[in-house]
Amino acid sequence: MSIILALLAALFASFTAILAKIGIEDVDSNLATAIRTIVVVLMAFLMVVITGHLPEIFTVTLHSLLFLILSGITTGLSWLCFFKAIQIGDVSKVVPIDKASVVLTILLSFIILQEPATPLVVAGGVIISIGTFVLIGRKEQKSKMDIKSNYIFLAILSAVFASLTNILAKIGIEDVDSNVATFIRTIVIIIFAWGIVFFQKTNKELKSISKRSYLFLVLSGAATGFSWLCYFAALAIGKVSIVTPIDKFSVVITMVLSIFILKEKPTKFTVIGGILITIGTGLLIL
């Protein structure tokens, strides 16, 4: 069941990137992230109510609460870096770099969570890693921009924070319903995201955002919500070293969608990398 949920999480995650790319074109990336988070937190709360776990919010232990809060903060940082990166770079290049977090996540799951390093998991992880780096392709020409404004640097930061998110969430979610955990994490993220928006005073731009951008940002937020609900349900019952790489199969789906919807041109690196990630994911499912 955890594998099916992880695959569903990957499907929804791929729609998240595409919809966000369309909606974020003329919007400050931090403001766009904050808007999307409103949708995610509403969906998470609705799921808690529907599943009847609302009272459990007040019984979460301090240990679990601490790690869920830390997980929420690292998610917020990952989001801010990721959505700024896709705003200034190609989705088909940013997403693979961001999903390189799977390598670090697998390593941390072996070291911190003491999950068994089976041959298939190791092989799958290695092949996915190779596929990810193939997708990045040749080094792009050095930009005159400062490295902090370079989308590759931002995508790498997003990957680091994402890997920390997975480990922290797994520790915090052990004795907590996955929907409750998702809701708690999202509350942290919405406070974090809107705090940055008000600090930067970009909230003044809310009135200037077009209806089209609002629509796609809301749809992107909904896709994120569904992806999270599936992912953390899978994480609660499965192993991080297996669930996370399968979830990252969204890289391949996103690349296909970016070619057909965003009209981004595929390269030989895109095709070869996509095939390698597919093979690696297949090994993990086995």
Image (cartoon, rainbow, N blue to C red):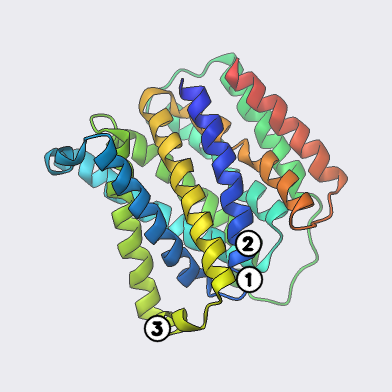
Looking at numbered disc 3 in the image, what kind of residue is underneath it? Lys
Disc number for residue 63: none
At x 49%, y 36%, the residue is 105
Query: Neighbour class for label 2 at 10 Å: few (<14), some, many (≥20)?
Result: many
Secondary structure category for the residue under label 3: loop
Looking at numbered disc 1 in the image, what kind of residue is underneath it? Glu
Choose mark 3 or mark 1, whichever is in front.
1
Secondary structure category for the residue under label 1: loop
Looking at numbered disc 2 in the image, what kind of residue is underneath it? Lys
Where in the figure is residue 160, as x and y percent of width and height?
50, 49
Residue receiving disc 2: 21
Query: Neighbour class for label 3 at 10 Å: few (<14), some, many (≥20)?
Result: few
Q: Are marks 3 and 2 in contact (CB under 8 Å)?
A: no
Q: Is residue 88 above or below residue 173?
A: below
Task: Answer whether residue 162 is visible to the viewer in this image.
Answer: yes
Residue receiving disc 1: 25
Q: Residue 12 versus residue 2: which sits nearer the camera? A: 12
Q: Is residue 143 above or below residue 37?
A: below
Q: Are marks 2 and 1 in contact (CB under 8 Å)?
A: yes
Mark 3 or 1, nearer chain start: 1
Residue receiving disc 3: 201
Q: Is residue 113 above or below residue 29?
A: above
Task: Answer whether residue 180 is visible to the viewer in this image.
Answer: no
Where in the figure is residue 154, as x and y percent of width and height?
58, 61
